[in-house]
Structure formats: C-alpha cells, structure tokens
Image (spheres, grey):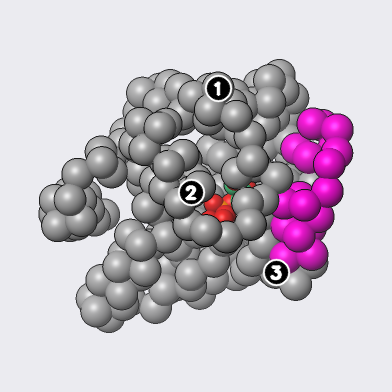
Amino acid sequence: MARGRFITLEGLDGAGKSTHLTWLVETLRARGLTVVQTREPGGTPLGEKLRALLLADPMHLETEALLMFAARREHIAQVIEPALMRGDWVVCDRFTDASFAYQGGGRGLAREKLAVLEEWVQAGLQPDLTLMFDVPTEVARSRVTGMGRELDRFEREKSEFFERVRNEYLARAAASRGRMRTIDASRSLDQIKKSLQEIIATI
Ligand code: TYD
C-alpha cells in the first residue's frame, strides 16, 4: 500500500483558507481518493481541549508553543500517521508553519526553540505540499473583524502582529524549496481555484 499524501493549508486569519479547504477536499475525493480532513490546533479529543485553552486563556509565549506541539504530537500519533500508513490523504488546516509564523514571527519566540520541538514531535514528518493563502494584512483584518462574531485570542492581536506573521510565512515559503506554494488569495475565487487545480494536478 502506497503511503498517502500530507497537504497543509496556511495563511493569516481571514485569508479565506476555510473556503478553499472545503473545495480542495471535495476535489480530491472526486478523484477517488480517501481524504482525512483535520485541523490544528485540534484534530483529536485531547487536541480540541488544548485548542480551547490556546484560543481563550492568556499564557506565556513558551507555554503557548509547547501546547501547540503537545496537541500536534497527539494528532500525529492518533490521526495523521495512521491515515498516511493506510494510504489515505490527509488535508490539515494549519500545521507547523503556523507555529513558526505565529509563535516565532508574531510573538518573537526563538526559531531555534521551535526547531527543537519540530524535530522532537515530527521526527522528520513534513507535509508533502503546503498551500499558503496570502493576502495583504489589512484585507485579512477587515474580513475577520467584519464577521460579526466574538474574536479569539489570536484574532484580537494588533495589525503589526499579523504583519510579522505574514512576513514569516512569506520568508518560509521562499526558503521551502517548493514545498510551500504561495497563492495570491486577494484574487477572485475562480482564479484561485484555477491556481489550485494546477498545483494539485502535479501531486
Ligand atoms: P484557525 O484554524 O485559523 O482558526 P479559525 O477556526 O478561527 O479559522 O486557527 C486558530 C488560531 O491558532 C490561528 O489564529 C492561528 C493559531 N495557531 C498558532 O498560533 N500556532 C499554531 O501552531 C497553529 C496550528 C495555530
């Protein structure tokens, strides 16, 4: 049985990731693939409890990073690795690039510390493909604040925080040797779908 593919989606809150995730999963299923759709932080019963804490409770920035990776350890063991071993494809809403972008770029946690956690928790596991939905920070911000729902602890951060998150995502994409594909998500939905079609046709 061939190992499945591991695809992650990234981008600022408000970049439109969720819309494209639904479309991507449907498109892959229409190809006859078995797709496990999941998310981080979360994806397991324990991970979802950690998510609730992470999105609501104030905490030290290192505690935040450690809990993100604790949830990830459980997620890899319980969901991601077994699915890939079965030959299923895994589509995950956020993964470790978000830790580097938010805890590293946004909060200023040393990249070396994150790299230690990445090596420990993932032991070499990396996404085969990461779709990074990029929009100018102001566009993402106005979409999030215009949703009319209560904002979580990350969404309440200032524009400068999101500017640093975005810059980190862009820098990682440039250094990723093709693993991360930056998608200009300020275009129309049809144009974005066309780009996605082209990218997934190659994997
Ligand atoms: P997200 O799935 O975008 O939430 P929503 O359901 O509101 O679309 O992710 C929740 C938040 O978690 C998001 O603001 C980014 C943050 N996050 C990190 O800071 N580090 C991480 O490693 C991950 C996976 C997420």
Quote the CA–CA distance across marks 3 and 2.
Answer: 26 Å
Label 3 sits on residue: 44
Residue type at mark 3 is: Thr
Q: Residues within 10 Å of mark 3 (few under 14, many from 20)?
A: many
- Tell whether 1 sits left or right of 178: right
Give me the residue at 46% from left, 29% from top.
166
Range covered by the magenta-colored residues: 48-65
Residue 10, image quadrant: top left
Residue type at mark 1 is: Glu
Q: Main secondary structure of the magenta part?
A: helix
Residue 157, image quadrant: top right
- Pinpoint residue 50: horizontal percent, then vertical percent: 79, 58
Label 2 sits on residue: 144
Q: Is mark 2 within 8 Å of ligand 1?
A: no
Residue type at mark 2 is: Val
Could you tell me if the residues under marks 3 and 2 are in contact, i.e. CB atoms within 8 Å? no
- Tell whether 26 sits left or right of 40: left
* Front of the two marks 3 and 2: 2
Q: Secondary structure at mark 1?
A: helix
Give me the residue at 48% from left, 48% from top.
144
Q: Judge by depth and name the residue closer to the eye, 182 or 55.
A: 55
> Which badge, 3 or 1, is on the more N-terminal residue?
3
Q: Quadrant of the N terminus?
A: bottom left
The label shown at residue 160 is 1
- Pinpoint residue 143: horizontal percent, then vertical percent: 42, 48
The label shown at residue 86 is none
* Front of the two marks 3 and 1: 1
Quote the CA–CA distance across marks 2 and 1.
Answer: 15 Å
| Image position of 20 with respect to 79: above or below | above
